[in-house]
Image (tube, rainbow, N blue to C red):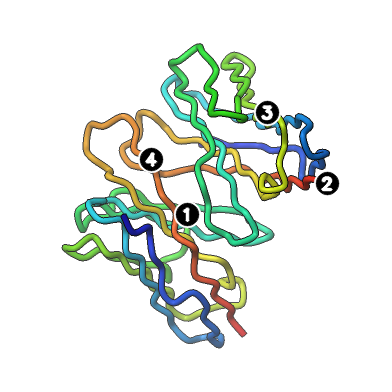
C-alpha cells in the first residue's frame, strides 16, 4: 500500500518570503500522480499543483513550484512571495496511475502560518 | 458553473443512530469520492462511485455505505453511529472518464458530523 508522509506538522513564514513544505511517499509503482492541496480555515479543499511521475520537469503554478525527486520519493512544495492568503493546511497526496479510479492517499498535513 | 455541494453542512447525532449525507457533484461529473477527515487519522478514503457503481473502497467497516443515483448525486450512510465517527466528511467529484489518465477532483465544503 502506498503511504505519504509529511514530517512538518507546522511551518511559519514571513509575508513576501519563501517557504518549502516537505513530503515523502512510498510506492512500488512507476506510474502515479502527486498533488498538493490547500485547505483554508473555510475547509474547502483546493488543488494547488500536480505532478505526473513520468514527467521529469518540475511543475510550476505561479508562485507555487515543486521539487520532485522520483528516486528519493520526495515531493516538496515551494511557495514564493508568501501572502497572507496562503495561510492554510497543506496536504500532499498520491494517486495511483495504474489503479482504476480516483482514490487519493493523503499525508497528515502541514499547517502554514503567514506572519505580516 | 456551480461547485460541489454537500448537505447538510452540520449534523449532530447520538450513538446508535444512523445518518445520511448527500453530495451533488459538478454538472457533467460522473465520479464521486468520499473522504473522512479527523484530527487523529487525517484524511482517509471511504469509497468512490462512478456511473452508479462503486469502483473503489477504503478500509472502513460495513457500517459505512454509499450509493450514487442516475443524476450522479451520491449519498453516504453510516449506521449504528459511534463516537469515533465524529468527523468532517468530504466528497469530491470529477469527470472520472474511463481510460483518461488524470481527472482533477473538486472538493465540496464538507459535512461536519458530531456524534454525542
Image quadrant of residue B87?
Answer: bottom right
Mark nearest the camera among 2 and 3 is: 2
Residue placed under numbered mark 1 in the picture: B59
Q: Residue at x 49, y 26 (%)?
A: A51
Residue at 38 percent across and 29 percent down: it is A97
* Distance CA(mark 1)–CA(mark 3): 33 Å
Q: Which chain contains the residue that carries disc 2?
A: A
Pointers 1 and 3 within a single chain: no
Q: Secondary structure at mark 4?
A: loop
* Tag 2 secondary structure: loop
Q: Is residue A79 left or right of residue A35?
A: right
Q: On the rendered image, what quadrant is the N terminus of chain B found in? A: bottom left
The answer to whether the residues at label 1 and label 4 have Cβ atoms under 8 Å apart is no
Question: Compared with residue B85, is residue A47 higher up or lower down, i.e. above or below?
Answer: above
Please tell me whether mark 1 sits on a helix, a strand or a loop.
loop
Distance in Å between CA atoms under marks 2 and 3 = 19 Å
Q: Chain of mark 4?
A: B
Both marks 2 and 4 on one chain:
no
Q: Position of residue B13 (x, y in %)?
A: 53, 85
Secondary structure at badge 3 equals strand
Q: Nearer the viewer, mark 1 or mark 2?
A: 2
Amino acid at each position: 500500500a502506498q503511504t505519504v508522509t509529511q514530517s512538518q506538522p507546522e511551518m511559519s513564514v514571513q509575508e513576501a518570503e519563501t517557504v518549502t513544505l516537505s513530503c515523502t511517499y512510498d510506492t512500488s509503482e512507476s506510474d502515479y500522480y502527486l498533488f498538493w492541496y490547500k485547505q483554508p480555515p473555510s475547509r474547502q479543499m483546493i488543488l494547488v499543483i500536480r505532478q505526473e511521475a513520468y514527467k521529469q520537469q518540475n511543475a510550476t503554478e505561479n508562485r507555487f513550484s515543486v521539487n520532485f525527486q522520483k528516486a528519493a520519493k520526495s515531493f516538496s512544495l515551494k511557495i514564493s512571495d508568501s501572502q497572507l492568503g496562503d495561510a492554510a493546511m497543506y496536504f500532499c497526496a498520491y494517486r495511483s496511475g495504474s489503479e482504476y479510479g480516483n482514490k487519493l492517499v493523503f499525508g497528515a498535513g502541514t499547517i502554514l502560518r503567514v506572519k505580516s | 458553473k456551480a461547485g460541489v455541494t454537500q448537505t447538510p453542512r452540520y449534523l449532530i447525532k447520538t450513538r446508535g443512530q444512523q445518518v445520511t449525507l448527500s453530495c451533488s457533484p459538478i454538472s457533467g461529473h460522473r465520479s464521486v469520492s468520499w473522504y473522512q477527515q479527523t484530527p487523529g487519522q487525517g484524511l482517509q478514503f471511504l469509497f468512490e462511485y462512478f456511473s452508479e457503481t462503486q469502483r473503489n473502497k477504503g478500509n472502513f467497516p460495513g457500517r459505512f455505505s454509499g450509493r450514487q443515483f442516475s443524476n450522479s448525486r451520491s449519498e453516504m450512510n453510516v449506521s449504528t453511529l459511534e463516537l469515533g465517527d465524529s468527523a468532517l466528511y468530504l466528497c469530491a467529484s470529477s469527470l472520472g472518464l474511463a481510460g483518461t489518465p488524470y481527472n482533477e477532483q473538486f472538493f465540496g465544503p464538507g459535512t461536519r458530523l458530531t456524534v454525542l
